[in-house]
Amino acid sequence: NLCIDSTGAVGEAFNASTGVATSIVDLACVVSSIASEVLSVKPQIIYEELNQGSFSQLVPEKRRNTAVLQNLWLSNEKAKKILGWSPKTGLADGIRREMIWARNHFDRWKTIHYSSSLSESYEQTSFITV
């Protein structure tokens, strides 16, 4: 409601983030751990060593970007300044809450359509590629 109620938010985009830098590997580990706890699945984390600029063998058309495997960080300063917003939930707790919501509202996911190549290849597999 902060964006709806604030005239300063009109036409603006905001990052809703923890403000803490997180690597893709750390994010994959958090997601895998929480998925195991909440969804009773243990996604396999796949590490693919690629030189910068090389294409992935696992994800078609995905090119390795050095920055992607380093820390990711979104500034939430604009949201703090214009909206008075600050994060109240950490990354792991936010992911856990989202997974619980998705598990409890799984029927809403039935409207999502995936490309045939993805659904055929990965339909029965839980994985995270980093």
Image (spheres, rainbow, N blue to C red):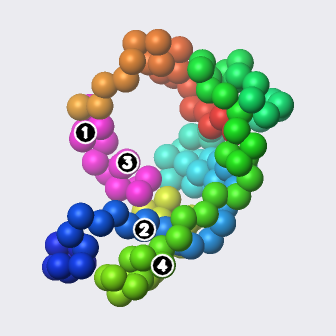
| Separation of marks 2 and 1 at Cα, in angstroms | 26 Å
Q: Are marks 2 and 1 in contact (CB under 8 Å)?
A: no
Assign a secondary structure to mark 2. loop
Query: Looking at this view, is 13 or 70 the one in front?
Result: 13
Side of 49 relative to 18 (left or right) = right
Which residue has dot 2 on it? Answer: 16
Q: Amino acid at mark 3?
A: Arg
| Separation of marks 2 and 4 at Cα, in angstroms | 10 Å
Quadrant of the snapshot with the N terminus: bottom left
Q: Are marks 1 and 4 in contact (CB under 8 Å)?
A: no
* Nearest-to-viewer mark from 2 and 4: 4
Q: Residue at x 23, y 31 (%)?
A: 111
Query: Which quadrant of the figure has residue 66?
Result: top right
Where residue 113 appears, x then y in whole percent? 31, 25
Where residue 89 appears, x then y in whole percent? 47, 75
Q: Residues within 10 Å of mark 3 (few under 14, many from 20)?
A: some
Which residue has dot 3 on it? Answer: 103
